[in-house]
């Protein structure tokens, strides 16, 4: 099997797990909600249409544009981690701008919160930045539901997945962003931490317009972790007393619940969908916040490296591994920006 055939096979299996992808995307119907000055950049809060059939589904995001920079600029989508409420505001360093932080996030401390404000770092480095809320978090929580609850989504789309929805939403955002005179459509990257790191790989794997991908603290494995990739909804009588359940990929349930059935794809396979475009695997050696888990999976790297070698671009897969726990500390962020400077921020 040639690399192109192998990549097409992975893509088909991945799309089937996700529940497919709608053939059409809505016109963005962009609405500017407000504009403010930031530290060396302009902040524009926007709302975009997120669903052809449901007008209440709107994508909210921050567009950061460096002051004084000559366009068109390279664009980086900045995807936030699980925040349980503050969403995109965390990435611009204003986590309590719209909603108060949960006690767990307050306990992270000032430095760890700052480390997740990496949209600012990219804007100050001369990139146009788009930082959206993922569906269910930030201002995209479902009406009448807590952050990360997904009842309305699965009522509307019983055969789809939230991972598929996140990819779709970011594709809509790129559709709109590439119409702006400030944006260079030929230089688009994506970076995310944790949940945002998963999302960065998933987007890059299915949208060829993305020219460079960084997943920080977001590479993992599709092992039989039923309570992560293939969660089931809470029984109605437990909804009020238990934490919200974010349901990633319902299509994974048959595989996750039966150890004897091999998964159709591995996480390293999805990384291979990005090949031969540049991909940076970033993460800490340990993950002290989740005992027994790590951020550096040899099997995931090996699978991705094999596919990159078969693509003819082995050096396009790079890594930024650092000591510590599940975080995005200053030196790691500096290294990431320097990597984007090399692979994306080039003179046209």
Image: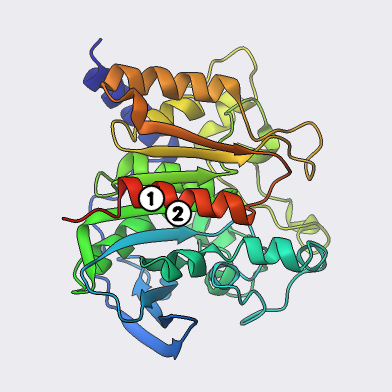
Residue 11 appears in the rendering: yes
Relative to the observer, which residue lies in front, 311 or 143? 311
Residue at numbered disc 1: 340
**Residue 161 numbered mark, or none:** none
Give percent across and percent down for residue 6. 29, 18
The residue positioned 60% from the left and 48% from the top of the image is 194
Query: Mark 2 Cα within 10 Å, few/some/many (few <14, many 20+)?
Result: many
* Alpha carbon distance from label 1 to label 2: 5 Å
The residue positioned 40% from the left and 38% from the top of the image is 279
Give percent across and percent down for residue 98. 61, 82
101 sits to left or right of 331: right
State the SS at label 2.
helix
**Residue 337 numbered mark, or none:** 2
Q: Is residue 8 above or below residue 33?
A: above
Relative to the observer, which residue lies in front, 294 or 17? 294
The residue positioned 44% from the left and 80% from the top of the image is 40
Contact, mark 1 vs mark 2 (Cβ under 8 Å): yes
State the SS at label 1.
helix
Q: Is residue 117 above or below residue 171?
A: below
Query: Mark 1 Cα within 10 Å, few/some/many (few <14, many 20+)?
Result: many
């Amino acid at each position: 099997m040639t690399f192109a055939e192998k990549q097409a096979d992975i893509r088909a299996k991945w799309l089937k797990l996700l529940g497919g992808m709608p053939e059409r995307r809505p016109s963005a119907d962009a609405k500017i909600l407000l504009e403010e000055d930031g530290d060396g950049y302009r902040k524009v809060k926007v709302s975009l249409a997120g669903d052809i059939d449901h007008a209440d589904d709107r994508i909210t995001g921050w567009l950061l544009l460096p002051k004084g920079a000559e366009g068109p600029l390279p664009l980086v989508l900045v995807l936030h981690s699980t925040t349980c409420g503050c969403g995109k505001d965390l990435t611009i360093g204003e986590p309590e701008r719209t909603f108060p932080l949960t006690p767990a996030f307050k306990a992270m401390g000032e430095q760890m919160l700052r480390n997740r404000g990496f949209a600012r770092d990219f804007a100050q480095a001369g990139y146009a930045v788009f930082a959206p809320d993922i569906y269910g978090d930030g201002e995209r929580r479902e009406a009448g539901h807590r952050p990360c609850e997904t009842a309305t989504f699965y009522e509307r789309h019983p055969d789809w997945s939230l991972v598929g929805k996140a990819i779709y939403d970011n594709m809509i955002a790129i559709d709109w962003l590439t119409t702006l005179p400030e944006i260079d459509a030929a230089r688009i990257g994506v970076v995310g931490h944790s949940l945002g790191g998963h999302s960065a790989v998933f987007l890059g794997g299915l949208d060829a317009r993305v020219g460079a991908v960084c997943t920080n603290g977001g590479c993992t494995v599709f092992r039989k972790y039923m309570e992560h990739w293939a969660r089931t909804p809470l029984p109605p009588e437990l909804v009020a007393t238990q934490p919200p359940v974010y349901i990633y990929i319902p299509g994974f349930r048959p595989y996750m619940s039966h150890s004897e059935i091999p998964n159709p794809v591995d996480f390293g396979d999805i990384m291979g969908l990005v090949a031969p475009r540049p991909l940076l695997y970033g993460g800490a050696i340990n993950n002290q916040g989740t005992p027994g888990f790590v951020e550096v999976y040899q099997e995931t790297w090996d699978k991705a490296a094999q596919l990159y070698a078969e693509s003819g671009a082995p050096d396009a897969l790079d890594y930024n591994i650092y000591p510590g726990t599940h975080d995005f500390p200053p030196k790691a962020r500096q290294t990431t920006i320097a990597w984007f400077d090399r692979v994306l921020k080039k003179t046209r």
